[in-house]
Amino acid sequence: MADHRATLREYADYACPFCYLTHRSLERYRGMREEPLVVDWRPYDLRGDSRDANGDIEGGMGYPEQVAQPIEQLRAEHDASEMLAPDTVPKVDSHDAQLVSLSVKNDHPDRWVALDGALFAALWEDGRDIDNEDVLADVASSVGIEADTVHGVLADDESRERLAERFADARHSGVTDVPTFVADGRTETGFLSADELDAFVRGE
C-alpha cells in the first residue's frame, strides 16, 4: 500500500494489552509496505503515577474491569486468539523489561525488533513473568542477546537513569496513555489496525 519511507514514533508499555494488540497491527503494517518503516520506539511507564518513592507500584497491578470487554472484542475482530485474557496474564511491573528493551535498542539496534516482539509474546501469549530477571535473560537470549548483557543492564544505575529520563520525556511531550503514535507532528492514541496505521502514516 504505502510505498514511501516513513518514520513512526511509538510510545508503548509491555504491560498494556492494547499495546500488544497494536504491536500485532504494526507487524502486519510492516508487511504491507513496499519500503521499510522506521519505528522510533519510546518507553512509557503506564503505572508511573502509582509508583512510590522507592519506585514500587502502590495499589496492585491488575487491569480495570472495563478493559476486559474491549480487549475481548478486539481479540475477536483481529484474529488474536493466541492472546491470553488480561485476567489470566501475570500482573507484572514492566519497568525492567523496558529497561532491557531500551538498552538493546541503543546498543544492538539490529536485534531490537525481534526483542520487542519476543517480550510482548512472552507476556501476552505465553503468560511469562517478564519482571523476573531470569525470564528477561531467557527472552533476550532467544533473539541473540547474551544473558550477561541483560544482568549487566539491570544492575546498571546509569541505564536506569536513562530510562527514567525517557519516561519523563514522554510526559513532557504530552503523552498520557499508550499506545500513542506520532508521525509528521500528528498524534494518535489507542488501538490502531494495520489499515488505520497506514492511513495515519499517510496523513489521511
Image (spheres, helix red, strand yellow):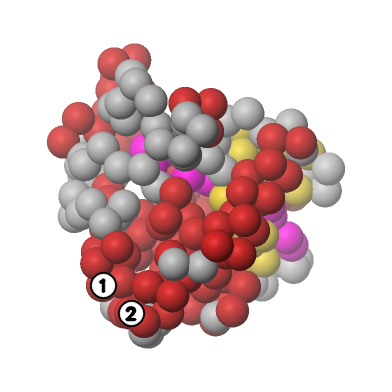
- Quadrant position of residue 103: bottom right
Vertical relation: 185 (above or below) 158: above
Q: Is residue 204 magenta?
A: no
* Front one among 86 and 102: 102
> Picture coordinates of residue 11 (x, y %)?
60, 46
Give, as a three-letter code, the residue at label 2. Answer: Ala
> 10 Å neighbourhood of mark 1: few (<14), some, or many (≥20)?
some
Q: Which residues are magenta?
A: 6-17
Vertical relation: 37 (above or below) 17: below
The structure residue drawn at horizontal position 51% and vertical position 33%, both measured from the top left corner, is 53
Confirm whether residue 76 shows in the render: no
Disc 1: which residue: 138
Residue 147 numbered mark, or none: 2
Confirm whether residue 54 shows in the render: yes
* Front one among 123 and 168: 168
> Picture coordinates of residue 55 (x, y %)?
47, 39
- Quadrant position of residue 160: bottom right
> Picture coordinates of residue 116 (x, y %)?
44, 63
Q: In the image, 191: left or right of 106?
A: left
Callout 1: SS: helix
Callout 2: SS: helix
* Front one among 26 and 87: 87
Residue 111 numbered mark, or none: none
Q: Are marks 1 and 2 in contact (CB under 8 Å)?
A: yes
The structure residue drawn at horizontal position 49% and vertical position 59%, both measured from the top left corner, is 99
Q: Residue furthest right?
A: 185
